[in-house]
Image (cartoon, helix red, strand yellow):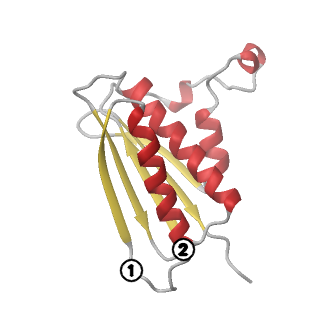
Amino acid sequence: MADQKGTDAHTLEQVLESALGSVDNAEEAVLEEARHLGFDEDDLHKIGMSVRECLVNAVVHGNRYNRRKKVHLKVVRTPDCLTIVIGDEGDGFDPAKVPDPLEGDNLLRGSGRGVMLMQAFMDEFQVSQRSPQGTEVRMLKCRAKSE
């Protein structure tokens, strides 16, 4: 069921363990926020896949499963859009250095498509350095305007 127009923003924040077991519950929490906005099944799939990819990247590549490091999730739901911010406490990375998954030998690799999928599935995708350490990914998905 979708919220009424003009509804105030709603914010959800979670601090997650650097373990793949944290991903399922966090993804479901984000999808629940998306359902409140009335996203259709196609958009729910895109949001879920983007969130899962980003969370797994934070655990595996960012925090490298380090139990002392956390993954930070923030979801802001406004009447028309969902903003998802996922941060890790790792060493950071430069998205420009991620190999193009559509080039040559990369086509045959079993991984390396997450950033490309997030960029394709979400309306906005930004990567920045997290203070004091780590990477923060901000994704935005808005409902299609009804005509």
Residue 79 against residue 84 in the figure, above or below? below
Residue lying farthest top? 105
Residue that numbered label 1 is attached to: 8
Residue 126 against residue 82 in the figure, above or below? above
Query: Disc 1 marks which amino acid?
Result: Asp
Residue 71 against residue 98 in the figure, above or below? below
In the image, is 84 to the left or to the right of 110?
Answer: left
> Are discs 2 and 1 less than 8 Å apart at CB?
no
Q: Position of residue 137 (x, y in %)?
A: 44, 44
* Helix, strand or loop for disc 1: loop
In the image, is 70 to the left or to the right of 104?
Answer: left
- In the rendered view of the protein, which quadrant contains the N terminus? bottom right
* Helix, strand or loop for disc 2: loop
Q: Residue at x 61, y 25 (%)?
A: 112
Task: Please give the label number shown on residue 80.
Answer: 2
- In the rendered view of the protein, which quadrant contains the C terminus? bottom right
